[in-house]
Amino acid sequence: DAGVIQSPRHEVTEMGQEVTLRCKPISGHDYLFWYRQTMMRGLELLIYFNNNVPIDDSGMPEDRFSAKMPNASFSTLKIQPSEPRDSAVYFCASSTYAGGGYNEQFFGPGTRLTVL
Amino acid sequence: SQKIEQNSEALNIQEGKTATLTCNYTNYSPAYLQWYRQDPGRGPVFLLLIRENEKEKRKERLKVTFDTTLKQSLFHITASQPADSATYLCALEIEGTYKYIFGTGTRLKVLA
């Protein structure tokens, strides 16, 4: 397996524009997580899905952020409109629960977003 | 409020020595704790998981301890090598869920 795939790897956009980040999880994994990482706040969980259903979106900063998982092999995180404070590295991770608390997350390479 | 603390300052050690990284938490009662390694420009990579009823877990040169009384986990790398230089993150499971909250990480630099 190729691991978790994210696109694009880098995105530079202007304030007010819509940004869509994409993720393909590892085949067979039933959990998908979206994280945001900044120097100040570290790695923050935004939302996670189980079997394509959003379970917890309490980390989504505000209504400008939305995430979807239309099928088991694809998820998107959309920011509309984008703001400079959204600049960060966004990671997608997937996992499958193996019992006994073993929920190793496999992270993608991340998307570095810069909003000017 | 819930909080996870890792040394925000970088840790520099000489090759061959043991590196010890600390993860402290408050207002959590995690059943599971994980450690990840992150290299610059890459996503975190899972290293070890330890359960609340396990005091210690080892994997090759890595050792993790979990003290639920002190609310602390220690992560040790013995016989450290320059290739061990990276940022190390601890993550606690929110009880009753499958989600983990991450610390901000500690950057380790092993000097040759």
Image (cartoon, coloured by chain):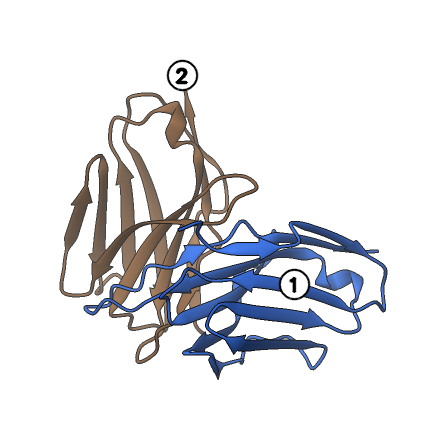
Chain colours: A blue, B brown
What residue is shown at x 83% (from left), y 67% (from top)? Answer: A17
Q: Position of residue B79 (x, y in %)?
A: 25, 26
Q: Position of residue A80 (x, y in %)?
A: 76, 74
- Figure check: B93 above or below B15: below
Given the image, what chain letter belongs to the residue carrying mark 1?
A
Residue B71 visible in the current orientation: no
Q: Position of residue B68 (x, y in %)?
A: 22, 64
Rendered-image quadrant of the C terminus of chain B: top left
Answer with left or right where residue B102 lies relative to residue A10.
left
What residue is shown at x 61% (from left), y 63% (from top)? Answer: A22
Q: In the structure shown, which secondary structural element does the residue marked by tag 1 occupy?
A: strand
Q: In the structure shown, which secondary structural element does the residue marked by tag 2 occupy?
A: loop
| Disc 1 target residue | A21
| Mark 2 neighbour class, 10 Å CA radius: few under 14, some 14 to 19, many 20 or more | few
Given the image, what chain letter belongs to the residue carrying mark 2?
B
| Disc 2 target residue | B112
The nearer-to-camera label among 2 and 1 is 1
Q: How many numbered discs sit on the rendered protein?
A: 2
| Mark 1 neighbour class, 10 Å CA radius: few under 14, some 14 to 19, many 20 or more | many
Discs 2 and 1 share one subunit? no
The amino acid at mark 2 is Ala
Pick out the residue farthest to the top: B112
